[in-house]
Image (cartoon, rainbow, N blue to C red):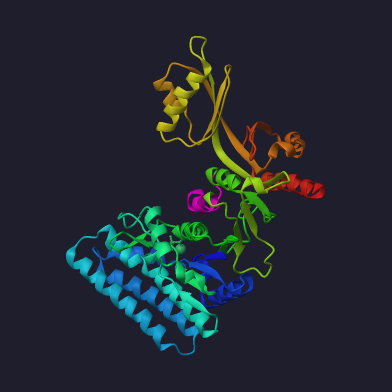
């Protein structure tokens, strides 16, 4: 069984819904769980409308009518005549309007009030897709994720209760025995009183991962979790700045973690934790591409064999701090002391390297002011650009990176299994970044 998750843009228009339909039909053998986000922009707008309800009711209604029209437009373009669905959309917006009016009367908003309105985004999108599958004769079933995912009662940003969720899944296990396409809502759960709760922004990836985790725990074979978006997988660099960035074929969970830590816009490691713990492969796919081979498979390192360099990241405007421990203190205890000081100050630390002779810390903000006033230590600070090549077993590929050092005025700072860190003492221009990307990846593909 596969889990397919579609983000907001994948259900952003009538045409997008049809692409989702195609993706479901061509990527599964019938049995799958489809986890949906709300139609693009809906969650933001419902949040805004709810927040406005206690300030400016008219503005709130205006936002809601835009959201309603967007949904009715999708419905009218997808179906010639679907009175039931029209009624469904209308009844939901009537309910939202009633709630908003009540909040206005009360003059205050609770976290539950917010989640009860915002949750309608996913309830709408999932129902539309369900009707589409029905209209095309595909055996399908709508699942209410509020009856499956159990959370605490921090409604707007709730935490999943794994034990209770497992019990809920088990109590409904018979449902999953049928050969159906199951459609469900991402982002939603409910607390033990049954009231709807939200898993935090971007929570649908987490939902997909949870469905994989619990179905796997119940003994279903989950081949993979597919995350469908509007880009072709995870790319070798930020495509907004590196024009020839290309799709990475496969990478490890660990690499995703480091990429995300360094600031790349990839799957958030927390949202894929359940999938990782069940060792389920993830695949990032593009709903809008005709070329389905352009996707990225994300697996445990134990399943990767060939060393690879996959991606390049530039962290502009950061700082290299060098601390020289004095002879009265052990270098490693100095390191710990300063590191805690810097971390508690909220500075983002990318990397630290410690030896008895020198401690180097690479960070986002200039640490000099803090160290000047708080500590009697000898240190120096340089403004630098930090670059990172991530991959798998990077140390085996290091010769390719070496060849670029002189040409691009770089030096290696450190490397780990999944990442090689480089620095440049001057600003690293975008044009140079493009050249470095092509230099390394062109070289590399010749060797592949
Ligand atoms: N619709 C929710 C959001 O925009 C959840 C998601 O899309 O993942 O945050
Ligand atoms: Mg969304």
Q: Residue at 51% of width from left, 85% of height from top?
A: 135
Quadrant where ligand 1 appears: bottom left
In the image, residue 261 lies at what x, y percent?
Answer: 53, 43
Give coordinates of residue 75: x percent, y percent. Answer: 46, 81
Say which of 432 and 352 sits in front.
Answer: 352
Rendered view: 281 above or below 34: above
Quarter occupied by residue 337: top left
Residue at the farthest right position: 446
Residue furthest to the left = 106
Depth order, front residue of 24/325? 24
Q: Nearer the viewer, residue 170 or 70?
A: 170
Q: Quadrant of residue 317?
A: top right
Where's residue 220, x and y in %?
54, 62
Observer able to see residue 133: yes
Taking the view exactly as shown, the residue that stands out farthest to the top is: 328
Compared across the picture, whether 240 is left or right of 333 comes to: right
Q: Quadrant of the N terminus?
A: bottom right
Visible residue check, residue 12: no
Q: Is residue 72 above or below residue 37?
A: below
Report the span colored magenta: 263-276
The answer to whether residue 49 is left or right of residue 340 is left
Residue drawn at x 55%, y 45% as measured from the top left: 257
State which quadrant residue 48 falls in. Answer: bottom left
Q: Is residue 145 above or below residue 389?
A: below
- Give whichever of 4, 310 is nearer the camera: 4
The location of residue 61, given as percent across then percent down, is 30, 73
Check residue 327 for magenta coloring: no
Q: Count the labels in the image.
A: 0
């Amino acid at each position: 069984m596969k889990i397919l998750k579609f983000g907001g843009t994948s259900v952003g228009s009538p045409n997008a819904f049809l692409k989702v339909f195609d993706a479901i039909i061509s990527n599964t053998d019938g049995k799958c769980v489809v986890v949906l986000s709300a139609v693009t922009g809906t969650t933001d707008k419902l949040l805004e409308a709810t927040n406005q309800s206690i300030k400016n009711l008219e503005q709130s209604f205006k936002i809601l009518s835009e959201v309603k029209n967007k949904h009715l437009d999708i419905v009218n373009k997808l179906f010639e005549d679907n009175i039931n669905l029209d009624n469904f959309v209308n009844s939901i917006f009537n309910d939202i309007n009633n709630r908003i009016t009540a909040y206005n009367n009360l003059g205050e908003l609770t976290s539950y009030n917010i989640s009860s309105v915002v949750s309608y985004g996913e309830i709408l999108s999932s129902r539309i897709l369900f009707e589409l599958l029905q209209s095309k004769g595909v055996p399908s079933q709508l699942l209410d994720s509020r009856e499956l995912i159990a959370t605490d009662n921090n409604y707007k940003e709730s935490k999943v209760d794994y034990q209770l969720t497992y019990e809920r899944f088990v109590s409904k296990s018979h449902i999953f025995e049928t050969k159906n396409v199951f459609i469900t809502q991402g982002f939603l759960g409910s607390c033990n009183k049954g009231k709807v709760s939200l898993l935090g922004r971007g929570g649908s990836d987490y939902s997909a991962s949870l469905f994989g985790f619990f179905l796997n725990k119940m003994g279903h074979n989950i081949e993979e979790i597919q995350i469908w978006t509007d880009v072709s997988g995870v790319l070798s660099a930020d495509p907004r700045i590196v024009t020839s960035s290309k799709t990475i074929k496969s990478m490890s969970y660990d690499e995703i973690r480091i990429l995300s830590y360094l600031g790349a816009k990839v799957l958030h490691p927390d949202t894929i934790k359940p999938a990782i713990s069940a060792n389920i492969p993830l695949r990032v796919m593009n709903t809008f591409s005709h070329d389905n081979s352009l996707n990225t498979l994300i697996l445990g390192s134990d399943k990767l064999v060939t060393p690879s360099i996959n991606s390049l990241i530039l962290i502009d405007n950061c700082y290299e701090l060098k601390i020289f421990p004095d002879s009265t203190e052990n270098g490693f205890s100095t390191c710990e002391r300063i590191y805690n000081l810097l971390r508690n100050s909220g500075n983002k630390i990318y990397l630290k390297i410690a030896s008895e002779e020198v401690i180097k810390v690479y960070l986002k903000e200039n640490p000099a002011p803090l160290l000047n006033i708080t500590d009697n230590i000898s240190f120096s600070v340089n403004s630098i650009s930090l670059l990172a090549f991530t991959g798998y077993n990077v140390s085996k590929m290091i010769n390719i990176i070496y060849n670029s050092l002189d040409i691009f005025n770089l030096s290696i700072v450190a490397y780990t299994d999944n990442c090689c860190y480089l620095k440049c003492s001057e600003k690293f221009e975008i044009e140079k970044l493009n050249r470095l990307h092509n230099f390394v990846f062109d070289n590399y593909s010749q060797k592949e």
